[in-house]
Image (cartoon, rainbow, N blue to C red):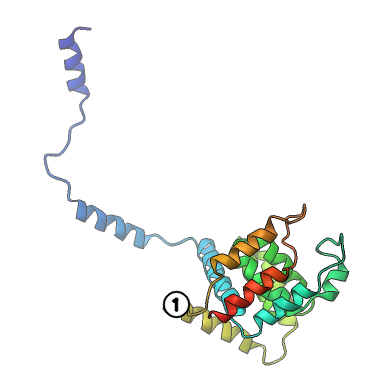
Amino acid sequence: MTSSALEDVLADARIPTSSKSFDVAAGLRRLAADAALSSPNPDLTRAAQAQQRLSVVSRWVLNEPGAAGHVDRLAEDPPQAGEEPGHAEAAEQLDIDGALVYGCLLYLTGHPESAEFWWKLAAGAGHRAAAYCLHLRHCELGEDREAQHWLHQLVQTMDESGDGFFEALETVAKYVGTNGSAASVPTGCLEAEVERLASRAPGCGIVRRPDRRLADRFHRFANCR
């Protein structure tokens, strides 16, 4: 094909364009309007709300005045040598509030599976806040059956004044969502201590009880608030 013939073919293949300049601002406004009209995925919205609420509850638990003392007790009563997490004997020795606090710490430092394990130990002993954490965690994962199970467990442990528990959490979560929170999040040093223990996790991948070193670091976290 000659150079002249090639130019003729390319000329015929050229896509015609408007001589008008493109209005970028108007285009962005149209995209924004289209996005506003599209309905959000309800499952994704529910999962995001559960994640935000669980983060709020976890921070709330870590900032409770007695949290450090519960981590102390959890660290001072380690399982017997060779004992794997999940043994019935381990659950009987636990400070149940400590299991809740530790689970919240693990969740906020990026170990949600380990958080579930410790929350389940506490919830199995009747701890309502731990059951609520598990309910939110399964909502976050889109696991409706498991979420309903833990909600049912929670409701079973409530008396006639139990609605106040939900109302308090709803109020706190909504306030934090709108105004932010002064509740402290785990510091880098505290997160490093969690990672140290996580690196020693057994084959099941569950982070074991806090040791004295992590408990001391948690005290520093609590005293710096």
Image location of residue 51, percent across then percent down: 55, 67
Q: Residue at x 13, y 45 (%)?
A: 21
For the residue pair 188 and 160, the one nearer the viewer reads as: 188
Evaluate whether residue 154 shows in this view: no
Q: Whole-percent x and y of residue 224?
A: 54, 79
Q: Residue at x 25, y 58 (%)?
A: 29
Q: Quadrant of residue 66?
A: bottom right
SS class, disc 1: loop
Residue most extreme to the left: 19
Residue 99 is drawn in which quadrant? Answer: bottom right
Q: How many numbered circles are shown? A: 1
Image quadrant where one finds the N terminus: top left
- Relative placement, left or right, of 18 versus 216 is left
Is there any visible trace of residue 203 in the rendered image? yes
Residue 166's place in the image compared with 94, above or below, is below
Residue 174 spot, x, y in % from top left: 49, 79
Position of 39 with respect to 194 (left or right) is left
Outermost residue toward the bottom?
161
Amino acid at circle 1: Gly
Residue under circle 1?
Answer: 180
Side of 57 relative to 69 (left or right): left
**Which of these two is toward me, 197 or 146?**
197
Q: Nearer the viewer, residue 122 or 42?
A: 122
Using a 10 Å C-alpha cutoff, classify the residue at mark 1 as few (fewer than 14 neighbours), some (14 to 19) or many (20 or more).
few
Task: Decide which of 161, 137 is in the foreground and name it.
Answer: 137
The answer to whether 160 is drawn above or below residue 52 in the figure is below
Q: Residue at x 50, y 65 (%)?
A: 45
Task: In the displayed orientation, state which residue is furthest to the top.
Answer: 2
